[in-house]
Image (tube, rainbow, N blue to C red):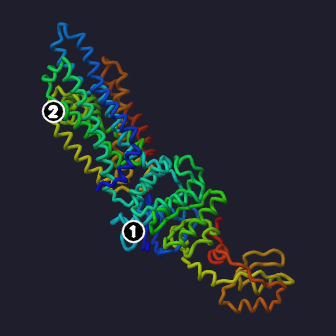
Amino acid sequence: MFPKALWMKEWKHTKIISFALLVVYILAYPVAAGLSIDSWKARQNSLHWSEQSIYEIQSLFSGELYAVIGVIVIVLLAGFLIGLEKNTKRYDFMMALPFSRTQMFLTKYFYGLIVIGSTYAISFLSGYLVIVQSEFSYLLSEINMLYAFFSPLAMYFVIFSLAMLVGTITGEVKSQTVLSFIFLIYPQALFVLIASMVDLHGGDPGSVYNDNFIMEDMFWFSYLNIGTDQNVLIPLIFGLIFTGLAWFAFIRSSSEYCGEFLMFSQLHPLFAILIPISGALLGSFIVGGVVPYDAGQGLKMMVYWIGFIIALFFAFKITKRLLNR
Amino acid sequence: MIRVSGVSKKIHNKMILEDIRFSVQKGTVTGVIGRNGAGKTTLLRLIAGILQPSKGEITVDDQDVFIQPQIKQQVVFVPDSTDALKTYTIKEIIRFYQQIYHTFDQDYFYELLERFNFHKDGKIKSFSKGQKALFSLILAFSTKSQYILLDEPTDGLDVIVKKQILQLIAEVVSEREVSVLISSHRLDELEKLADHIVVLKGGKVDSEFDMEHLKDQYRKLQVAFQDGMPSSLREHVHILSETGRVAVVLVPQDDQDSIDMIHQANPILFEDLALTLEDIFVAKLGGDLYVS
């Protein structure tokens, strides 16, 4: 099922990005833990240390900024595994090899998962050991270590699966990377834009904002916050769905569309609607933002719709160029 | 045997190949010729399993390349660009090919490298364009696979490398029962190598010939007449060239009447010339395919 030749090929082309991920996680956990201990020593006698310490230990095992950088590297890793090949003759080379498409996809997929899982686990455990051996080991009792370990890991899993899915439906690495980042926050961004429109037209934006499933459960970055108690099963289930779809798209894609924006012409109508409408909503949101808060409702609406029409025009032009590439 | 059965390929709603049928026998060199855009590379990519046919079936030793991709152990595709290999070192590519092709012959590989004055290590990207092309071929033949697909193997190379490549292909085919399928628009090169020719024109198989029998079909004659070629003769022969009183004509081998007519016109020169593939294409297809 996993030919050694395919592992060798993936390792050859992604070892740099794999090491980059390891470096990011090492900075996020053991290095950050060591540096935090120094900082905590200086602050442990302060008045509010007992309240601050909980926040400090939670922040440390959330990975903070490095976790977000980790997400960026994971999206790039998926790009190296799938999209980059489509930009070069390497895709033809791979497809001519005596392996099935399922073998090719699963090797890429599990290679990525192993890289993410192993680099994260090694770094997380190293960070844990640094704290355990320090005088601040008592702080570990303030957090659920199992949840702290699995919640971000579930987020990395769903994001990697999503980026792999986007990689299988797009025709090259640039569109894969850009669309992966957009789809990471697309549902929430769309809801914010719709809420803004509802608000301007006298509706209740809260009805949109308060959708917990979209705004929290499906906002993958929220799983970095180990202080909350979110259901880790949701990213796991979505990750599995994305993986299934990615496998299906990989085995069904036609190699002749490599280098184009999308590998499937069947998706053109969907993107031909989504891009202009999303672009128009974003454009009207931005243009509408220049109107002073206390301006009249009529002016606000007029500027909003002017922004909408202008953005729709440009988004339509861009979409046309992308899909006709 | 590679069998291409009624294969059509549509890309962006444009028919690139239509109802292609031919087979590649074991131990033969088959040339696929056609002008740029005729569908040669698409056809090779289909056989290599890179593209999937819109219609029809491609089998290698009776196994479908898409349903049983493991049969591609016996098929090596050498594209016109070596970009896929450029990041590897020689040692890495050997290890890689040993994992892919169970029959990869390392000793034979090094033997060929030595023969063509390659270093035994170093990065492939440091090779010249010609060396890369030759190296790809060495790599393909070292797999000891049964079928080698070569897409424009000599395109853009200097005459020395071209000669080396053509010689290597000829040698390997004569040494063992490997089948080579070459796409090219160079008739002169294929003429030296191919046993069988498939002509693609506008995405269809225009004609198919066995080289052995092809040259038996025509005679190429250089003739000259005192007062130029008689107009009555012009209708019976295919004139390849005409300079002053001297003309080079093609006459079907079995057309004794035309030969008799030439003799009756009292030629001052009547000489058989060596027939080339180009002559036949000019005669059969009005020169439309000759693009060398």
In the rendered structure, the answer to whether residue A56 lies left or right of residue A168 reads left
Report the number of discs. Answer: 2
Q: Compare residues A280 and B238 and report the one nearer the observer.
A: B238
Examine the rendering and report whether any part of residue B158 can be seen. yes
In the rendered structure, the answer to whether residue B244 lies left or right of residue B91 reads right
Please tell me the numbered disc located at residue A146. 2
Where B232 falls versus B245 (above or below)?
Answer: below
Residue A220 falls in which quadrant of the image? top left
Q: Are marks 2 and 1 in contact (CB under 8 Å)?
A: no
| Label 2 CA crowd tier, 10 Å (few <14, some 14–19, many 20+) | few
| Label 1 CA crowd tier, 10 Å (few <14, some 14–19, many 20+) | some
Q: Compare residues A291 and A13 and report the one nearer the observer.
A: A13
Q: Residues under labels 2 and 1: Cα distance?
A: 54 Å
In the rendered structure, the answer to whether residue B207 lies left or right of residue A321 reads right
Q: Where is residue A187 in the image (x, y as percent from the top left)?
A: 26, 37
Check disc 1 and report the residue beneath it: B55
What amino acid does circle 1 point to?
A: Lys
Where A2 falls versus A300 (above or below)?
Answer: below
Where A116 falls versus A205 (above or below)?
Answer: below
What amino acid does circle 2 point to?
A: Leu
Q: Is mark 2 on a helix, strand or loop?
A: helix
